[in-house]
Image (cartoon, grey):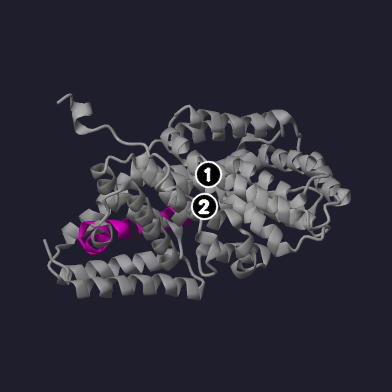
């Protein structure tokens, strides 16, 4: 086994961050940054005494550990397309708009977006569909677009925190070895106060603006949905079923598969779409074909094909983190940070710091999830703090702060969708910065869930 010096560590990390930053600057896929980083790391570490078989073995081990995640991501892509063709997503938009009539529009936008995000399982997907619809309707109000988008972003990123069909949450659960049911119970401890604070914030901001409902805009969307789909409240039972099955502890892959199957049946039975067309949507994606051009532009999903690059990026991040961990490059740095931790509060604080820094410097949430999830598990076990607390802390910090940085992939996608930069909407994305603050403040107050002691589990 080779050995890496402190100087080598800084050189390797500089190269990795440089390649990822280069991808962001050039506007190309992060896949190239991860792939280039892996190849260069393998080359440098081979010079330092590691064999190629050892290095590729590290990559293989990391990839195999997360193999179910790749299938989940592809299933999520298929499910979103089918939920659009089946009328599930249009029904959510239809009834959501109906609910918003006469309400504080800013608060209603946050509430509707957050609920929809849980069912859709993707923050960016929620923003690019329901979020764009709300921004379009919001043109008829006096609420500045950047403030409205801040509320939409806050609601949308609930998906990446607690949605059972979220790729990022499933990555968090996989790397921390936590079950969804346990994670949800733990996450609600911090999410509940964060959600209330955020909702109150939007209520008070919203009352400063005209809340007269633009019925014309609402009715235009609703009429186009009714003309293009067979809308029924029964369609809402499918996403509700998915949430119920997840809370009951059913494995995520089975839950999403049921959601996909239900969407296929609804597409064929309720929308009278041929089975061949449904499977075309699953693979190649779906695009709305209603009387509203604006509605058609938001009812778009790329299907399984669009998720292939996502799978490769996640695989690249996992491979990179696996080499960084198993070769001993980054562990000394992490150990230095956590060596002085002797309390649960300190552990949560350092976890949030590490996850956030990695999300900030790598321009994506993936590394901010994978590395702390892998490298801090032992410390949580040593202090007998349950792994669900590790999952919660990563979710409350590194995951939700992503859209606040203008250089982050999420922020870049949001500005490409809406034309509004993170600098403008960031201050109004209340949940995204309140969440880590509340988590850290409560870290020394909340009684964390502890793992059973060795004696309790072995009977010694």
Where is residue 411 shown, x and y percent of the image? 56, 64
Q: Is residue 333 magenta?
A: yes
180 sits left or right of 277 in the view: left
Point out the residue furthest to the top here: 459
Q: Residue at x 67, y 59 (%)?
A: 149
What secondary structure is marked by label 2?
helix
Q: Residue at x 45, y 71 (%)?
A: 23
Give the overall secondary structure of the magenta segment.
helix
- Residue 341 visible (yes or no): yes
Label 1 Cα neighbours within 10 Å, binned few <14 / some 14-19 / many ≥20: many
Say which quadrant the C terminus sits in. top left
Q: What is the distance, in whole Å, between disc 2 and disc 1 at their CAs?
A: 7 Å
Say which quadrant the N terminus sits in. bottom left
Numbered circle sitting on residue 272: none
Kindly identify which residue carries mark 1: 191
Marks 2 and 1, the one that precedes in the sequence: 1
Where is residue 29 shown, x and y percent of the image? 47, 66
Q: Is residue 47 magenta?
A: no
Q: Residue at x 32, y 36 (%)?
A: 450
Q: How many marks?
A: 2
Q: Are marks 2 and 1 in contact (CB under 8 Å)?
A: yes
Where is residue 174 shown, x and y percent of the image? 37, 43
Quarter residue 4 falls in? bottom left
Where is residue 407 shown, x and y percent of the image? 51, 70
Numbered circle sitting on residue 435: 2
Point out the residue furthest to the front here: 445
In the rendered structure, which segment of residues is drawn in magenta?
Answer: 306-334
Quarter residue 99 falls in? top right
């Amino acid at each position: 086994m080779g050995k890496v010096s402190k100087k080598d560590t800084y050189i390797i990390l500089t190269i990795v961050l440089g390649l990822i930053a280069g991808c962001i600057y050039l506007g190309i896929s992060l896949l190239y940054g991860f792939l280039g980083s892996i190849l260069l790391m393998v080359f440098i570490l081979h010079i330092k005494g590691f064999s190629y078989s050892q290095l590729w073995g590290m990559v293989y081990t990391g990839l195999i550990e997360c193999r179910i995640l790749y299938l989940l991501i592809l299933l999520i892509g298929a499910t979103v397309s089918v939920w659009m063709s089946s009328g599930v997503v249009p029904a959510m938009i239809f009834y959501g708009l109906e609910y918003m009539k006469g309400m504080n529009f800013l608060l209603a936008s946050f509430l509707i977006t957050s609920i929809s995000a849980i069912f859709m399982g993707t923050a960016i997907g929620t923003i690019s569909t329901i979020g764009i619809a709300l921004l379009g309707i919001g043109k008829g109000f006096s609420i500045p677009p950047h403030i409205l988008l801040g509320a939409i972003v806050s609601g949308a990123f609930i998906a990446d925190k607690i949605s059972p069909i979220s790729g990022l949450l499933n990555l968090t659960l996989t790397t921390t070895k936590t079950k969804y049911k346990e994670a949800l119970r733990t996450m609600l401890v911090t999410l509940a106060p964060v959600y209330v604070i955020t909702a109150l914030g939007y209520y008070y901001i919203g009352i400063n603006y005209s809340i007269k409902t633009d019925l014309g805009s609402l009715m235009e969307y609703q009429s186009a949905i009714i003309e293009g789909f067979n809308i029924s409240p029964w369609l809402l039972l499918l996403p509700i079923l998915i949430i119920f099955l997840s809370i009951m502890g059913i494995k995520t892959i089975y839950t999403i598969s049921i959601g996909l199957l239900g969407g296929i049946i609804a597409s064929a039975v309720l929308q009278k779409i041929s089975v061949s067309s449904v499977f075309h949507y699953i693979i190649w994606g779906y695009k709305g074909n209603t009387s509203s051009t604006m509605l058609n532009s938001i009812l778009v999903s790329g299907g399984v094909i669009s998720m292939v690059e996502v799978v490769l990026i996640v695989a690249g991040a996992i491979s990179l983190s696996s080499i960084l961990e198993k070769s001993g490059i980054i562990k000394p740095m992490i150990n230095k940070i956590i060596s002085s931790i002797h309390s649960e509060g300190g552990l949560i604080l350092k976890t949030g710091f590490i996850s956030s820094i990695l999300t900030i410097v790598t321009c994506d949430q993936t590394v901010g999830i994978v590395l702390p999830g892998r490298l801090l598990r032992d410390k949580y076990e040593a202090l007998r703090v349950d792994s669900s607390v590790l999952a919660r802390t990563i979710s409350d910090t590194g995951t939700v702060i992503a859209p606040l940085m203008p250089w982050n992939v999420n922020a870049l996608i949001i500005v490409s969708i809406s034309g509004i930069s993170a600098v403008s909407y960031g201050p109004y994305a209340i949940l995204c910065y309140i969440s880590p603050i509340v988590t850290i403040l409560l870290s020394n107050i909340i009684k964390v869930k502890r793992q059973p002691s060795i004696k309790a589990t072995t009977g010694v």
